[in-house]
Amino acid sequence: MYCIEVDASGGLRESRRSRPTAGPGEVVIQVVAAGINRADLVQRQGGYPPPPGASDLLGLEVSGHVTEVGPGVTQWKAGDAVCALLPGGGYAQYCVAAASLCLPVPRPLDMETAAALPEAAFTAWTMIWQLGGLQPGERVLVHGGASGVGTLALRMLAAMGHTAYATAGSPEKCALCLEMGAQAAIDYRTEDFVERVRALTDGKGVNVVLDMVGGDYVARDLRSMAVGGRLVLVAFQGGSSATFDIPRLMTRQLTIAGATLRHRPEAFKARIAAELHEHIWPLIKQGRIHPFIDSRYPLAQAAEAHERLASGVARGKILLLPGS
């Protein structure tokens, strides 16, 4: 099969490998589209390695058709249209996925667009609803609102009746956040999000913050939060360390939490898949949630696609198409 490998210098190269086979509890998927994530860029640089036993190829999410089922798999059959969360291996014509981490492609989405669902949906649900403990009537601040995770999180929040605010780095990205369901979009290059959030909430603050920035945002997040608020760190693009006011944390009963998804046990991620299928997939089928696609590239142009993501100009999700 055709695939894209990372070479010793961190570059991307076209290659050929044997088609993978399905082991117990696994399926093989003929890939229609693969989503690009910032984790792919980090892996190229030598960070965020795949879990033991996973493919060394990049690619954490795909959509496609099942071509083979392994022993013990009863929920899928050859020909089924699925999208799947992967530990790696998506930048190829074929990949292996855990059967428990596959979800049916929800109509009316087309096959390509469905590749933008898994990583963002799993991440948003895990970080906001599980780790953040979001409750009905609570308010959320989403940093990076125009990103792949941010745009889908805003759609999910709006569809489930939550008030959400977002930060983004340009008027165009702020406009997209509003289109995705944010009640207000804050341009962090020209506005102080702390002051804006306090004004938007009559001084009360937000209950949950989804932070992809880290660094000096952490202290500012705490100043934006309501009593009992929860800050969830999902990345640290702005810095891997932070200094903040501990008395504020204590007196306002705030919580800081963080997690990654890739190295969590399959059983944990399978529970997330089941919850998404129950709570989010029906809303997608109703047309109330859908991913925003920035651009599509042939698999051979993966390097150019990575450059677009790294440049910061992309909005929503970038897809790779092995068949192009």
Image (cartoon, rainbow, N blue to C red):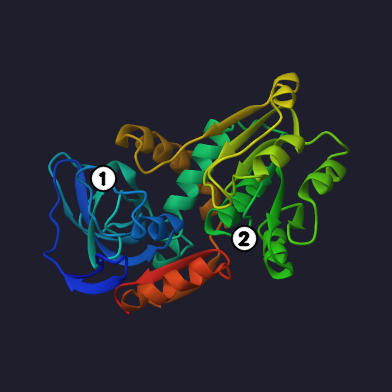
Towards the viewer: 119 or 227: 227
Q: Quadrant of residue 245?
A: top right
Q: Secondary structure at mark 2?
A: loop
In the rendered image, residue 206, in percent from the top left (x then y), is placed at 74, 37
In the rendered image, residue 116, in percent from the top left (x then y), is placed at 45, 60
Q: Quadrant of residue 251?
A: top right
Q: Secondary structure at mark 1?
A: strand
Residue type pointed to by label 2: Ala
Asked if residue 13 lies left or right of residue 138, the reply is left
* Residue occupying the point 54% across, 52% down: 237
Return the residue at label 2.
146
Q: Residues within 10 Å of mark 1 (few under 14, many from 20)?
A: many
Asked if residue 108 lies left or right of residue 274, the reply is right
Return the residue at label 1.
98
Asked if residue 130 lies left or right of residue 197, the reply is left
Q: Earlier in the sequence, mark 1 or mark 2?
A: 1
Mark 1 and mark 2: Cα distance apart in space? 29 Å
Check if mark 1's residue and mark 2's residue have beta carbons within 8 Å.
no
* Residue occupying the point 70% across, 54% down: 167
In the rendered image, residue 43, in percent from the top left (x then y), is placed at 35, 56
Towards the viewer: 197 or 97: 197
Residue type pointed to by label 1: Ala
